[in-house]
Every structure is written in C-alpha cells, then in structure tokens.
Amino acid sequence: MIAVNIVGYKKSGKTTLAVALARALGARGLTVAGAKFSHHPLDKTGTDTARLAEVCQAVAGLGPEETALFWPRRRYLTDLLPLLAADVLVVEGGKSLGWLPRILVLRAPEEAAELSPELALASFGDVAAPGLPHFTEVAALAELVAARGFALPGLDCATCGRPDCRELAREIVAGAADPTACQARGGGLSVTVNGAPMGLNPFVSRVMAGSIRGMLAELKGYSPGEIVITLEP
C-alpha cells in the first residue's frame, strides 16, 4: 500500500482535497481507502452501538450502505491498515504522523513551518509553501502521489540505522533513500494480513521464525527450506 497525508489547519480545504484526490486516484484504476482524524468523538451517542460499546471490547456496526467498527479505547492507524484493503490510503489530518509523506494545504505561507514541511511532497491550493513543489490541479497531484506515495510500518525500531520512521520518511521525501531501506519488511519472514504487509522488527521476526521452524521440525517429513503457511479467517 502507498499512502499520503493531507495536513493543514481548520478550514484550509483538507476534506475537499482528500475527496478530490481519492476520486482522481480511483480514476487511474487504483483502489483507494480513506482515514480521517477528528478532534471530536465519533457520533454514536444514544444508539444501540453506544450501549454495546459500554460492555464490549469492540463493536461493529453493519448497515445496508456502510460498516463501522468502534473500540472503546484508542487504536492507532497502523492497527487498522489490514482492514483497509486498497492500493492507496488517503489520510486527512493526523499532523503527528511521521511514517508517511504529506501534502500541505495552507491558509498562509507561514503555516508550512508548523506542519513538518520536511515530510511534504508538495503543497496544494491557493497558498504555496516556500521551497516545495506546488499544485493547483488535482489530476497532477494524483500523479505525484501515485509515483511517490509510501507508508512505513511506524514501528520506530531503528533497525534501518535511523532513530525512527520519521527520519527515514524525511530521507525518502528528500530523495536520499527509498522505502526498501526499511528493515521491518522483507527479510526471512514476511506476514501479510488481508494483503497488507505487517511491520516486523528483526527481533520479532527472529523469534517468530525460530518458533515456527522449531514446531515444524517436530513434524514428520519436515526438512529445511522455504516455508509457506496459509491461515484462513
């Protein structure tokens, strides 16, 4: 999955751009998922969903036109990626996210300095960000996102030689590295859930791989080699 983060302050046009960008990416034949950060509780007040949420670890709401999943505690966007099966993830809001590139939507040029411009691929709209490519056409922005969007696992495991995913993301945006520098994906063990690759730092990868090989070694017919395990839901 590749991803991009639309950031800006209130009434800067984030939602308008997120919707238009998702539509443009879809027109390119890509499947698109969306995520929106809110400073307000999700609206389930007074519903049966709210009553269930008081006594359940998680509540799924399924209707004829939409589905929602509620947890009565904070979860992180990386936890939800396996549920968002798509080629591209368009995220609105989430200024603190440091593991994916962003597009700045500004009301004034000076706002750019407060929105981590080192993670920005470009700015969009009526106001340009100093030193960044600037777009006013959604179709051109969609082309940029399709070419340069990415999503790191957000583990901050430091095994790539950087202190955290933010630093690696900064280097990728600057053209000094690419997503393959992330050591938490690939290697001897890889795990995907619903097609989404899971981030595994090398220690976890070694523990899991060793445990699996140890259990399989007790089975008749086992010999060292490539192992393929399929776990159906």
Image (tube, rainbow, N blue to C red):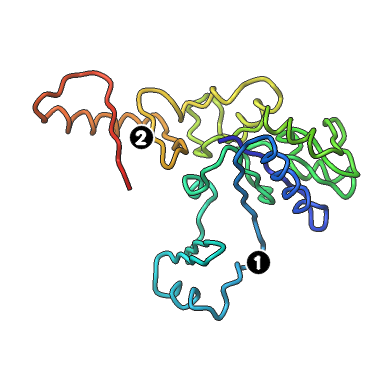
Left or right, 34 with reference to 219: right
Residue placed at 61% from the left, 43% from the top?
32
Residue placed at 11% from the left, 30% from the top?
219
SS class of the residue under badge 2?
helix
Residue named by callout 2: 204
Q: Are marks 1 and 2 in contact (CB under 8 Å)?
A: no
Left or right, 229 with reference to 84: left
The percent coordinates of residue 173 (x first, y second) are: 69, 28
Three-letter code for the amino acid on which mark 1 is drawn: His
Residue closest to the eye, 226 or 57: 226
Residue closest to the eye, 225 or 26: 26
Left or right, 230 with reference to 78: left
Q: Which is closer to the viewer, label 1 or label 2? A: 1
Instruction: Name the residue furthest left.
Output: 220
Indicate the quadrant containing the N terminus: top left, top right, bottom left or bottom right: top right
Residue 40's mark? 1
SS class of the residue under badge 1?
loop
Residue 63's mark? none
